[in-house]
Image: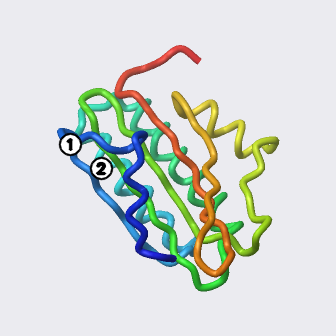
Amino acid sequence: MSDRDDWDSADLTDPGSPTVEVRTAASAALIPTIRAVASDLAARADFDLDAISDLRMAVDEACATLVDVAAPGSGLRCRFQVRDDRIDVRAEVEGAGADATVATDTFGWRVLETLTDDVSVSHTPGPDGRPLVGIVLGKSAGATER
């Protein structure tokens, strides 16, 4: 995965909000580490227990989905932006091929829609002709109507 700085798009930049970024190999075995970071950040931001659990499960599902479309040997990059009442997350991998994408008609995608306040897919050109495939999601601190 490249060290691109164009992650600093409007959806995840706020100079007053702390940002935490985790980079690992795109491996299912490392997802629990990212899940733990999500849980810890939400707890420190005073999210209620349901919101902490929802965020943890959503990050797990997003990362697992991305690992499935990742190029062999590529990395998984996950950025958390902590706001007063919300955490925004952007996870991204280098896709296995030019047509690598995240399907939005699956049970896993429905889980993401249920656990988060908003979720979307990003797909941008990357190095070596492989796309950078990502999932952007947001979760509020308190309980929300589903």
Looking at the image, is 6 positioned above or below residue 13? below
Residue beneath the point at 71% across and 36% down: 110
First of labels 2, 1 by sequence position = 1
103 left or right of 33 in image:
right
| Badge 2 amino acid | Asp
Residue beneath the point at 59% across and 85% down: 73
Question: Which of 56 and 87 lies nearest the eye of the viewer?
Answer: 87
Number of the label disc, if any, that sits on residue 15: 1
Q: Please state the horizontal and vertical placement of residue 116, each as a whole percent of the image.
A: 53, 33
The answer to whether mark 2 and mark 1 are in CB contact below 8 A is no
Residue beneath the point at 58% across and 37% down: 119
Number of the label disc, if any, that sits on residue 125: none
Number of the label disc, if any, that sits on residue 40: 2
Q: Please state the horizontal and vertical placement of residue 117, each as a whole percent of the image.
A: 52, 28
Q: Please state the horizontal and vertical placement of residue 87, each as a whole percent of the image.
A: 36, 38
| Badge 1 amino acid | Pro
Q: Secondary structure at mark 2?
A: helix
55 left or right of 107 in image:
left
Q: Secondary structure at mark 1?
A: loop
Q: Please state the horizontal and vertical placement of residue 132, each as a whole percent of the image.
A: 60, 64
